[in-house]
Amino acid sequence: MNLNVRISGSLRDFVTETVTDGDYENVSEYVRALIRRDKERAEREAMEAMKVRLQDAFAVADSEYEHLSADDLRRRALAGTNR
């Protein structure tokens, strides 16, 4: 994939300074690093959200759970419903 991005003003100056300071060999490398960092952030946020959902689920008292047989689960799966 090729992308063309126009930046100007202070953003252009910042990118130029970041690349010429030797942190990155070129602008493409810098942009790839930014995308990787953003992807890692999104993955961390998704993992944190999953942890919260799991903590909430495990905080429920055992008496709140409904005991189902394998046949019950199959019927629900085939019916496409959670209840």
Image (tube, rainbow, N blue to C red):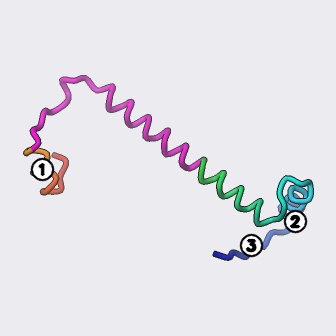
Report the residue at 22% width, 24% height from top: 62
**Depth check: 74 or 58 in front?**
74
The main secondary structure of the magenta stretch is helix
Q: How far apart are the two marked residues, 1 and 3, measured between alpha carbons? A: 51 Å
Question: What is the x, y in percent for residue 70?
Answer: 11, 42
Q: How far apart are the two marked residues, 2 and 3, measured between alpha carbons? A: 14 Å
The amino acid on which the numbered mark 3 sits, given as a three-letter code, is Val
Report the residue at 73% width, 76% height from top: 4
Q: Secondary structure at mark 3?
A: loop
Q: Are marks 2 and 1 in contact (CB under 8 Å)?
A: no
Q: Which residue is mark 3?
A: 5
Report if residue 56 lies within the magenta region: yes
The amino acid on which the numbered mark 2 sits, given as a three-letter code, is Gly
Q: Which residue is mark 2?
A: 9
Nearest-to-viewer mark from 1 and 3? 1
The amino acid on which the numbered mark 1 sits, given as a three-letter code, is Arg
Magenta stretch in the rendered image: 41-70
On residue 74, the disc is 1
